[in-house]
Image (tube, helix red, strand yellow):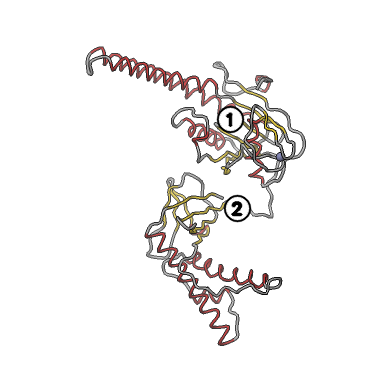
Amino acid sequence: MRRLHLAPTPQLDDLARAAGELYSRVVVSFWRTVRKKNVWLKPSSMMRWHTSNQLHAHSADAVVQGFYDALKSWRKRRKTDPQAKPPYRRRRYCWVQWKSSAIRVQKGELILSNGRGNASLVVPWPWEAPVRVELGWTGTEYELRAVYSRPAAEPVAEGGVAGADLGEVHLAVVHDGERTTIYNGRELRAKRQYQNKIKAALAAKQSRLKKGSRRWRRLGRSKQKQLRKLENQIRDILHKQTTALVSTLHDRGVQTVVIGDVRNLRKRVDYGPAANQRIHQMVSGRVRQRLGMQAVLQNEAYTSQECPRCGSRHKPRGREYACSACGFRFHRDGVGAVNIRRKYLGRGPVVGAMASPTGVRWQPHRRVRVARDERERIPAL
Ligand SMILES: [Zn+2]
């Protein structure tokens, strides 16, 4: 599930109003038929009777179904609560739902189809297509809820799934159910800092010279050259780290890499402008290149704070995450990856002991494919 908040626009208002109008017609027709003919119309008859020009046919059906769901829940409630009221009220506005037939993702945009002759609703969307989308009203703004449900009857196989927490404290921390591996980003961070330092120092030097002068221009060229060199080094590190990471997972038989979905980059380590995003893109790109491997995004809210065993939230202090509620203890940097994986699997608590994380450090001469014995243990992590 992904939530997106949207400020009101005439299009959103029109859609919500069209749904409300349809819902109200259904309410009136349903109870009138009960009163006059003593018949409870079936949802399918109601869907044929009432449609909407503005809404997609399936969206309109969903509104009708919404009324029947309310009816059903009332019939259930009244068994225990004699005060329970049936859905009599009309609605000025109503939520709108799009089913998969009306959902498309194209060029970074989510396109939600509406009734014939009506413009589609288009929202910027860097993610994959959801199976269902709902538009609701929170009281102050619209909320778009995108649902990525897997059929509940088919739980995901636990083996072959690894959670990856990218760019939190380290370049990446990966957890596959047993092992936790930390790829630290020390060299990358150092390069990035050095890059900023060069930028600042040369800009200061250049500002003392006359703009456009020979020395000014020469300094500018030198600055570009140095920055370009660093940029190449950074790209090289990113390439090698992400390839090593994905190769290792592939060798271990991981088929699904669950990546924390970063919408809140502020809390993360800043590896520099766009670098965080690049880490994500490169890892998911590398995963997709591998046969039989896929990358999926998982909402990562609170994943670094939540206790993997009991679900209570704590801000970890020090190197160890220690839950005061249940006593669970683990290396704090691994908690995010454990939780991202656990959330994707829809699993409850993590049970049993987990091995302490192993560290992988980037070495300048590391070859792209990492042999297992090359990985070193860093006990001090
Ligand atoms: Zn706990």
Kind of residue at badge 2: Ser
Q: Please name whichever residue, 34 or 102, is drawn nearer the observer in this view of the structure.
A: 34
Residue 344 horizontal side relative to residue 131, left or right: right
> Ligand 1 appears in which quadrant?
top right
The crowding category of the residue bearing disc 2, from other C-alpha atoms within 10 Å (few below 14, some 14 to 19, many at least 20), is: few
Residue at 51% of width from left, 58% of height from top? Answer: 134
Residue at 46% of width from left, 64% of height from top? Answer: 56
Query: Up-down: is 306 above or below 73?
Result: above
- Residue 37 position, x and y percent, is 57, 87
In the current view of this chain or complex, which residue is farthest to the right? 352
Which image quarter: residue 255? Answer: top right
Is any atom of residue 249 visible in this view? no
Q: Quadrant of the C terminus?
A: top right
Query: Up-down: is 8 above or below 373?
Result: below
Residue at 49% of width from left, 65% of height from top? Answer: 94
Judged from the image, the secondary structure of the residue bearing numbered disc 2 is loop
| Residue matched to label 2 | 149
Q: Earlier in the sequence, mark 1 or mark 2?
A: 2
Judged from the image, the secondary structure of the residue bearing numbered disc 1 is strand
Q: CA distance from mark 1 to mark 2?
A: 26 Å
In the current view of this chain or complex, which residue is farthest to the top? 215
Query: Residue 18 bears which disc, if any?
Result: none
Q: How many marks?
A: 2
Residue at 53% of width from left, 20% of height from top? Answer: 187
Q: Is mark 2 within 8 Å of ligand 1?
A: no
Q: Please name whichever residue, 131 or 134, is drawn nearer the observer in this view of the structure.
A: 134
Query: Up-down: is 96 above or below 309?
Result: below
- Residue 33 position, x and y percent, is 55, 83
| Residue matched to label 1 | 172
